Image (cartoon, coloured by chain):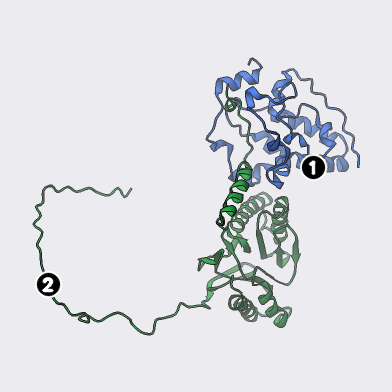
């Protein structure tokens, strides 16, 4: 009669079994002078702005892992529902899974009510989930969409607080982007002006913050239409080499040449087809 | 705010032991759980029928392991469903009167008894429908799904334990 014979029922969800072990391992590793692997973050610039007919969301496309760029073209604008999109900063896995779960829940909810989901619903679901996990889920989000009550924009912090504002920025490049917004935002802009403003804000983040880089993605949401522009602007093209450094044929002089033929017989020939099912 | 729930005595026909196993360690009624919003029983040595560590069935225990939670979220996550239910019942009681949560708790108790054999995972469909979590997806459905768990208890021993024959 071993302990396994009377199994405890595990209800699923997060399992904290390995936490103590991990803490011990971490202590041992730091004693030896190494560091444990870092989670992939999206040190980021994300922002959103409400204009006359709807909402414009913008994001850069760099994902970092410590001091190394892990992904040069990752997509940070996540789909929540046909009329709601969400940009995510922070730990990449957390933003991805959180937005997917909320997207599924919102779909079930809208099927149950029979109506197009509202941005306030998504906001409430997100903040309740993030508060439940007390900030351990590192997801900072910019949620924007257009529903029956009009265009709305929310910013959601990892601990669960939210702000409803006409323009928001999040991520490590948020200060650079906010500087652009504070200078040039005005209420009821036209679509082109709003897109230019968001593009400039993200560009400010890309060029002045080390955690943001590569291209600028834009998402324009209006009543009944969504324009997902990826990439809207390739701000950083990889450079082109101006000269060729290959050596020309004949640069190295040949002194002697020896040819040794290898006489091989074909003993057995068999054909194996690849299993491409 | 002190809410008074009348003692819901558990004098059911089936052996008390069954309910004890089903509800893990809550051998007392809902009233005792109101004293602290987060019952600390989760951290006490896993009490067997005599109140001490059941070494035969659950193995050795260590005071250091039981004293502190390994993660700040461990306790709150363990009791999350319980606290949600309690909060909802309180709200219901304040809005609709005492009978509403009483009747619901009776239905929960009945639905909780619809289980498969002790070593098999149950769908808990009736309980989910009552709670309204049948159209809600959370981390408990994605991570560590008990249906896909790699460990299973020994069928004979678990059934005997549940029936009290062991």
Helix, strand or loop status at disc 2: loop
- The quarter of the rendered structure image containing the N terminus of chain A is top right
Looking at the image, which residue is at 73% across and 60% down?
A120
Left or right, residue A159 beside residue A89: right
Q: To which residue does mark 1 refer? A: B88
Looking at the image, which residue is at 70% across and 40% down?
B78
**Closer to the camera in the image, A157 or B141:** A157
Can residue A186 be seen in the rendering of this structure? yes
x and y, in percent, of residue A168 in the image: 70, 71
- Chain identity of mark 1: B
Looking at the rendered image, the disc whose residue lies closer to the viewer, 2 or 1, is 2
x and y, in percent, of residue B56 in the image: 63, 22
Residue furthest bottom as drawn:
A242
Left or right, residue A262 beside residue A42: left
x and y, in percent, of residue A277 in the image: 33, 48
How far separated are the C-alphas under marks 2 and 1? 90 Å
**Mark 2 touches mark 1? (CB < 8 Å):** no
Q: Is residue A96 above or below residue A17?
A: below
Chain assigned blue: B
Residue B6 in which image quadrant: top right
User: Which label sits on residue A147?
Assistant: none
**Closer to the camera in the image, A172 or A185:** A172
Write down the colour of chain A: green
Total marks placed = 2
Looking at the image, which residue is at 52% across and 35% down?
B150
- Chain identity of mark 2: A
Q: To which residue does mark 2 refer? A: A257
């Amino acid at each position: 009669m071993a302990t396994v014979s009377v199994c405890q029922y595990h209800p699923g969800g997060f399992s904290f079994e390995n936490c103590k072990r991990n803490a011990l391992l971490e202590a041992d590793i730091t004693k030896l002078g190494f560091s444990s692997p870092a989670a992939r973050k999206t040190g980021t610039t994300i922002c959103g702005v409400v204009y006359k007919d709807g909402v414009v969301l913008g994001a850069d496309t760099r994902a970092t892992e410590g001091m190394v760029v892990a992904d040069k073209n990752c997509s940070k604008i996540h789909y929540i529902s046909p009329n709601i999109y969400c940009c995510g900063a922070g730990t990449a896995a957390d933003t991805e899974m959180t937005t997917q779960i909320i997207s599924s829940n919102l779909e079930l909810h809208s099927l149950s009510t029979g109506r197009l989901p509202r941005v306030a619903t998504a906001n409430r679901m997100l903040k309740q989930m993030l508060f439940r996990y007390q900030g351990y889920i590192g997801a900072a989000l910019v949620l924007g969409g257009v529903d029956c009550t009009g265009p709305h924009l929310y910013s959601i912090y990892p601990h669960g607080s939210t702000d409803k504002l006409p323009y928001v920025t999040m991520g490590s490049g948020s200060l650079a982007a906010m500087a652009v917004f504070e200078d040039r935002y005005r209420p009821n802009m036209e679509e082109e002006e709003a897109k230019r403003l968001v593009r400039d804000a993200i560009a400010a983040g890309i060029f002045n913050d080390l955690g943001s880089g590569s291209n600028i993605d834009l998402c324009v949401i209006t009543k009944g239409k969504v324009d997902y522009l990826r990439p809207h602007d390739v701000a950083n093209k990889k450079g082109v080499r101006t000269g060729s450094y290959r050596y020309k044929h004949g640069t190295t002089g040949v002194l002697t040449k020896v040819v040794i033929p290898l006489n091989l017989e074909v003993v057995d020939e068999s054909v194996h087809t690849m299993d491409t099912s | 705010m002190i809410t008074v729930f009348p003692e819901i005595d558990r004098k059911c026909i089936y052996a008390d032991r069954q309910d004890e196993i089903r509800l893990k360690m809550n051998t007392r009624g809902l009233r005792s759980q109101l004293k602290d919003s987060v019952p600390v029983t989760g951290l006490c040595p896993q009490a067997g029928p005599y109140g001490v560590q059941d070494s035969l069935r659950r193995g050795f225990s260590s005071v250091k392991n039981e004293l502190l939670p390994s993660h700040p979220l461990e306790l709150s996550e363990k009791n999350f469903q319980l606290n949600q239910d309690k909060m909802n019942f309180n709200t219901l009681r304040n809005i609709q009167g005492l009978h509403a949560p009483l009747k619901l708790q009776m239905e929960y108790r009945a639905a909780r008894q619809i289980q498969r054999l002790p070593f098999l995972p149950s769908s808990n469909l009736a309980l989910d429908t009552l709670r309204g979590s049948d159209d809600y997806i959370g981390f408990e459905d994605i991570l560590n799904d008990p249906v896909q768990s790699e460990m299973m208890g020994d069928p004979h021993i678990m059934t005997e334990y549940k029936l009290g024959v062991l």
